[in-house]
Image: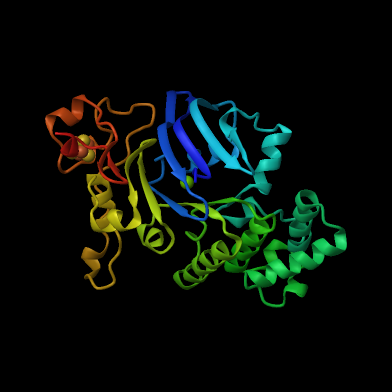
Amino acid sequence: LMPLIELKELKTYFRTDKGLARAVDGVNFSIKRERTLGVVGESGSGKSVTAMSIMGLIPNPPGSIEGGEILFRHKGQTIDLSKLPSNGSKMRSIRGNEIAMIFQEPMTSLNPVFTIGDQISEALILHEGLSKKDAKDEAIKMLEEVGIPLPAQRFDEYPHQLSGGMRQRAMIAMALSCNPALLIADEPTTALDVTIQAQVLELMNRLQEEHRTAIMFITHDLGVIANMADDVVVMYLGRIVESACVRDVFHNPRHPYTQGLMKSIPSLTASREDRLKPIKGVVPDLVNIPPGCGFEPRCPNAMPICREKRPVLREIAPGHQVSCWLELK
Ligand code: SF4
Ligand code: MG
């Protein structure tokens, strides 16, 4: 079976005052049906821009997709999303209907001036063609499904009347109301406290099974990836530096950046000082990417060649790809 979505050499650039920022620079990955791909990296790695490219939401100007393909295979068709006009009817119908997105901040997708219920039923009327009455019944069912207590009462409440965790659940209900084939989740639990975060992740896992949705899960938190992902890509400076199944990423990370991320996972048993070991150094400016390996300025294993030549992504074991000179020698 072909993957649901496949990115081939995707390039999304932004024109800035300082020069051309190569936010996504030749990214390849695919997501299989009903599976979860974790996309990991620090801010500025290109995770969110990749998601926005898939959704057709790159603001142009200053941004544009400069190359590559985003092949979406659904209902017997293959559509290259990168070639669709952002606001054309085709992209608008795919967005929300076939591909939905949830964010860290629910208020970016929930409208503060409409009730929760109206927003979910509006989506159902628009995308599923339900009557007003049926849409209301269905929306209440969705609110119940995502674990919102007293759903019939909550239907008439506004987003600000809900707690952060409940708003996140309402946003998930809205995203899933049209049964999307792909759900893109961009740091959906980052703003929540640990207990609520665990509940929302569990909810997403359960809903994924029931709705058979594929998920692209974007996070900087490898702990979340361990709970959610089947496969993982690690991004740095707009490129993929390592790609593997979740087990290999945790038990056999090969790129020094991935190894650094693993060490930065807070461990509950370690002493306070040892708990967080952030990777030293800062992410270079996207308009001044080093000519060799982008991670070289921060890499504890850097060698002379790393500064001169960019390593390519190479398969080092079945399903495990790494771009690092340590693996290319
Ligand atoms: Fe470090 Fe060199 Fe590998 Fe880059 S290519 S991650 S600098 S060892
Ligand atoms: Mg982001």
* Depicted 94 relative to depicted 63: above or below: below
Viewer can see residue 71? yes
Q: Residue furthest front?
A: 1
x and y percent of residue 295 in the render? 26, 37
x and y percent of residue 19 in the render? 43, 22
Viewer can see residue 157? no
Q: Residue at x 44, y 69 (%)?
A: 194
Q: How many marks?
A: 0
Q: Is residue 267 left or right of residue 220?
A: left
- Where on the picture, by quarter, is residue 54? top right
Q: Residue at x 71, y 41 (%)?
A: 93
Q: Residue at x 23, y 54 (%)?
A: 252
x and y percent of residue 124 in the render? 76, 55
x and y percent of residue 20 in the render? 44, 23
Q: Nearer the viewer, residue 247 or 168?
A: 247
The C terminus, quarter of image: top left
Q: Is residue 57 left or right of residue 295?
A: right
- Where on the picture, by quarter, is residue 221? bottom left
Q: Is residue 74 left or right of residue 199?
A: right
Q: Residue furthest bottom?
A: 150
Q: Nearer the viewer, residue 288 or 40?
A: 40
Looking at the picture, the colour scheme in use is: rainbow
Q: Is residue 98 left or right of residue 62?
A: right
Q: Nearer the viewer, residue 284 or 178?
A: 178
* Depicted 128 relative to depicted 281: above or below: below
